[in-house]
């Protein structure tokens, strides 16, 4: 092999390293938002607690369970590919996509209800109330909205990986795309694990 040639293994390793670097930037993004949340929580503790009481914990818990199931399904798809179980891999990816869709539907109804009762940034209800609650819901919509965008991106990447599995382009020896898609999806799930207690379980 010449000096200018690379092995498939090197290519797979490079893709994984690139994904980890990208995930690091995502951690910085959400980490910064969580720090901002912590600062305002310190200043407006009582208002944040009252704001949290107006969120539906059942929706939050349901979405947490849904994302945990989806993460398991993605991990199962990678294992299935490594074992040449194409059908199982496709089924697991389909399950993860379904979980992502259910999560977004739940969030749509949750947001819709909050808008109906006037719980959104700078609404008359919040402007007439404590400043801290307006800030709380502002952060709530920014952070959960950004997370929702990441869910959509993750579902798109998983769908592409699923198409590659179906086409036979992802194999037991070449599955970097699927593995990277899984890493991204796991990070999105992990971020929600932090969002859930910050907003829904604050006491």
Image (spheres, grey):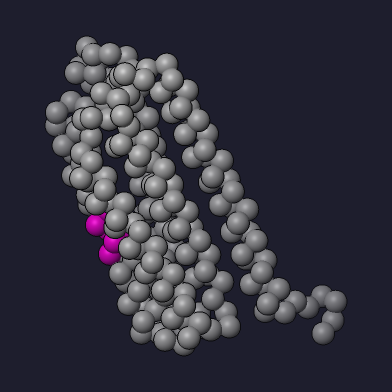
Residue for point 47% across, 75% down: 78
Q: Say which of 35 and 113 sits in front.
A: 35
Q: Is residue 27 visible?
A: yes
Residue 7 x %, y %: 72, 79
Quadrant (top left, top right, bottom left, bottom right) of the N terminus: bottom right
Q: Residue at x 56, y 40 (%)?
A: 28
Q: Is residue 30 above or below residue 105?
A: above
- Position of 121 compared to 114: left or right? right
Q: Quadrant of the C terminus?
A: top left
Q: Main secondary structure of the magenta part?
A: helix
Q: Position of residue 145 (x, y in %)?
A: 35, 40
| Residue appearing at x 20%, y 39% in the figure | 56
- Dividing the picture into quarters, in which one does residue 196 lie? top left
Give the extent of the magenta segment: 98-103
Q: Would residue 168 appear left or right of 58 to someone viewing this image? A: right
Check residue 137 for magenta coloring: no
- Above or below residue 55? Residue 125 is above
100 is within the stretch colored magenta: yes
The reply, left or right, for residue 202 in relation to residue 160 is left
Residue shown at 47% from the left, 34% from the top: 34
Q: State the image coordinates of residue 77 (x, y, percent, origin top left).
A: 42, 75
Q: Is residue 120 visible?
A: no
Query: Toward which corner of the image does residue 96 lie, by quadrant?
Result: bottom left
From the top left corner, tell me how far across and down residue 81 is, in percent.
47, 81
């Amino acid at each position: 092999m010449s000096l200018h040639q690379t092995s498939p293994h090197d290519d797979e390793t490079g893709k994984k390293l690139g994904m980890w670097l990208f995930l690091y930037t995502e951690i910085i993004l959400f980490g910064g938002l969580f720090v901002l949340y912590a600062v305002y929580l310190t200043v407006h503790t009582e208002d944040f607690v009252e704001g949290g009481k107006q969120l539906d914990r059942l929706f939050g818990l349901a979405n947490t369970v849904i994302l945990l199931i989806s993460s398991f399904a993605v991990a199962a798809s990678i294992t299935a590919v490594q074992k040449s179980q194409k059908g199982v891999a496709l089924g697991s990816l389909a399950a993860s996509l379904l979980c992502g869709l259910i999560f977004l539907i739940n969030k749509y109804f949750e947001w819709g209800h909050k808008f109906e009762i006037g719980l959104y940034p700078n609404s008359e209800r919040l402007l007439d109330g404590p400043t801290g609650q307006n800030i709380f819901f502002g952060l709530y919509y920014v952070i959960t909205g950004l997370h929702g965008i990441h869910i959509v991106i993750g579902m798109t990447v998983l769908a592409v990986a699923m198409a590659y599995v179906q086409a036979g382009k992802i194999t037991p020896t070449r599955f970097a795309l699927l593995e990277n898609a899984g890493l991204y999806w796991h990070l999105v799930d992990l971020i929600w694990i932090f969002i859930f207690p910050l907003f829904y379980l604050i006491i």
